[in-house]
Image: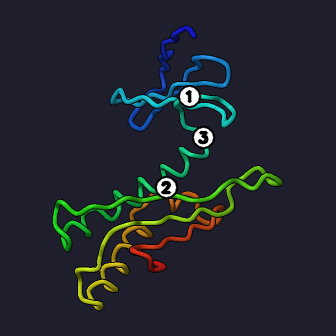
Amino acid sequence: MSEHAHQVSDRIGRGSVSVTRTGPRLYEGLNERGATVRIGGDELEGEHFSPGELLKLALIGCAGLSTDRVAARRLGDDYAITIWAHGMSDPETNRYTRVEEELLVDLGGLEASDRTKLIEIMARAIERGCTVARSVEGSIDLDTTIDGSPA
């Protein structure tokens, strides 16, 4: 596989990203900070993300960033969380219609009322602050659970 440099566009600005083809059905994504990601078709072997996986990563990455400050304020800066996105595209319509976000964070050390309140605060933070979720609203049903509870 040969290496290809990302061609420069005169429209590059804040938020611009690019992909360049590095092989059959394989691309490299690049952002302005120099981070890269390999993108390819589901049928390919090797380490890469499919576009659908990147969509789901964008959703849950945004959920994490949206809830980070409110959770850290109540749980401490070193709190642990893992967020999963579950769901496949509908083969008949060739689109994602539903994605389930699962925020795995242990809130068991909180009083029941404080746990409920934090789940509500985190859900609101996602609703208000997650640009990606707001962008797909109306196109993808997004179900969220936090510490096993529907948000």
Q: Could you classify mark 3 by the number of other residues whose Cα lies within 10 Å: few (under 14), some (14-19), or many (20 or more)? A: few
Give the Cα separation between the discs numbered 2 and 1. Answer: 24 Å
Residue at position x 67%, y 25% in the image: 25
Question: Is residue 62 shown above or below 44?
Answer: below
Query: Which secondary structure lies at badge 2?
Result: helix
Type of amino acid under label 3:
Pro
Give the Cα separation between the discs numbered 1 and 3. Answer: 15 Å
Q: Which residue is mark 3?
A: 51
Numbered tag placed on residue 46 in the rendering: 1
Query: Which secondary structure lies at badge 3?
Result: helix
Front in this rendered view, residue 42 or 72: 42
Residue at position x 41%, y 53% in the image: 61
Numbered tag placed on residue 36 in the rendering: none
Q: Could you classify mark 1 by the number of other residues whose Cα lies within 10 Å: few (under 14), some (14-19), or many (20 or more)? A: few
Point out the residue furthest to the bottom here.
Answer: 113
Residue at position x 56%, y 65% in the image: 100
Q: Earlier in the sequence, mark 2 or mark 3?
A: 3
Question: Is residue 14 shown above or below 59?
Answer: above
Residue at position x 64%, y 63% in the image: 98
* Left or right, 75 with reference to 19: left
**In x, y percent, where is residue 149?**
45, 80
The N terminus lies in quadrant? top right
Displayed quadrant of residue 92 = bottom right
Are dots 2 and 3 in contact, CB under 8 Å? no
Q: Which residue is mark 2?
A: 59
* Left or right, 147 with reference to 76: right
Type of amino acid under label 1:
Gly
Type of amino acid under label 2:
Leu
Front in this rendered view, residue 141 or 8: 141
